[in-house]
Image (tube, grey):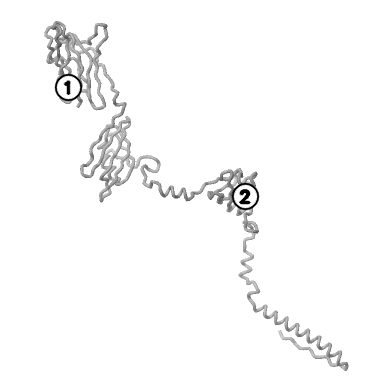
Amino acid sequence: MEIKKPKSFEVSDKAHADLFNDMVKVLLENDQGLLEQLLTHKSDVNLHSSDEEKKKWNESQIYKITADNGMQLINVSADSKIFDAIKDKGTCTFYAASGVEDSPSPSNISLRGMQIVGQNNIGAGFAVDIAGNAYSFYYNSGHTTITWTPLPNLSDLNKWNGSQLIKITNDTGGVRVSVGTTESLLDKITQAGKTFGTFYSPAGVQDNPSALSARGFYHFTSADSNNKGTFGWVIAVDYRNNVFTNYLDLNLGWQGWRRLLTAADEEVKWTKVRLPLDNDWKIYNSVDGTPHTLQYSKDALGVVEIIGSITGGKVGFESVVFTLEEGFRPLQSTHFIGVASSVGKGSTPQIHRTAIGKDGKVCVQYCSNDLNPNEFITFGFRFRTR
């Protein structure tokens, strides 16, 4: 802008003319100074906001998520609920005093948190109490309270990092190894390698410890280059509660199944011999009429015992008294010596010889009392089954 200089006043009264001209000169000098300041301001970009800056301000967050001093926007007193205080709000920060009813923290601990909202009455966020415990939360439209979820802390992480990491069952709690009906139990578990696990094997599986199905544990502490177990053990329990063990040694192989005996195994079941007996033999009765019941049993080790007394039958090599059922017969034919009646022989003790064949036939073959050979024959024999 060009500043035009006005023409000076020239009058006969020079004193008044000079005074007026001096005033105009000052005004012009002031205008010139203002113009220079305006031109300087116009060229100084630091004193002006650009269109980009104006756009940034116009699009800036106008909703507060904290108080003006940077503290929490919402304060929840002890007699209020966090849900009621924030459910109608947008994204915000909050403080809940100790004792707030719906706080996830212990009643003596305050809580600070932040809520994020995407839709009306639907919120989520997190909070941390003054003990350092962290929580996430959410609520949906129609909910009447907040759902809180504790977040893991350093102690939790250390616990998990130091925990056992291998699986001993499948993800649903079942066994880790299931043995097929055509597979070998021992081969299948050694294929699991250096590990600890559980298994199930149905009845009839090769190398099963029992004729029944079984479940159990295995543990191999080393493996070969093919990741097959080389040293370890296995414990199996069949569905009749019988327990078996086996051990694998790389140099010796599997040691064979061994059944563990319990107090229950000490109890035996006695079976009475079915009457009538063969070849006219009968149960012997004492003078007071008490019968010497003829019966047999088998313990957990497979030892059979026969007790009882008989009378009145035929003595001879083919004189069968009774026949033992399958599972109670000896490994091979065997003979026993027992007490016989001494009636007619004074006080001289008498004996009998009884044979038990692999077919289970029990025969009184001989009696030393040739006068009364069948007066009294008593049994008290033990032998191992097949």
Say which of 77 and 283 sits in front. Answer: 77
Q: Does residue 30 appear to the left or right of 103 in the view shown?
A: right
> Total label count?
2
Q: Does residue 79 appear to the left or right of 135 in the view shown?
A: right
Q: Position of residue 39 (x, y in %)?
A: 68, 80
Q: Position of residue 164 (x, y in %)?
A: 38, 46
Q: Quadrant of the N terminus?
A: bottom right
Q: Position of residue 78 (x, y in %)?
A: 63, 45
- State the CA–CA distance, disc 2 to disc 1: 90 Å
Is the residue 282 above or below the residue 335 in the image?
above
Q: Amino acid at mark 2?
A: Ile
Other residues around mark 1 within 10 Å, as few (<14) / some (14–19) / many (≥20): some
Q: Amino acid at mark 1?
A: Asp
Residue 327 picture quarter: top left
Say which of 227 and 108 sits in front. Answer: 108
Q: Residue at x 73, y 84 (%)?
A: 32
Q: Does residue 355 appear to the left or right of 238 in the view shown?
A: left
Q: Residue 191's mark?
A: none
Residue farthest to the front, as pictured: 347
Residue farthest to the bottom, as pictured: 12
Is the residue 8 above or below the residue 156 in the image?
below
Other residues around mark 2 within 10 Å, as few (<14) / some (14–19) / many (≥20): many
Please report whichever mark, 2 or 1, sits nearer to the chain's N-terminal start: 2
Secondary structure of the residue carrying tag 1 is loop
Q: Quadrant of the C terminus?
A: top left
Q: Residue 86's mark?
A: 2
Q: Name the residue that disc number 1 marks.
A: 359
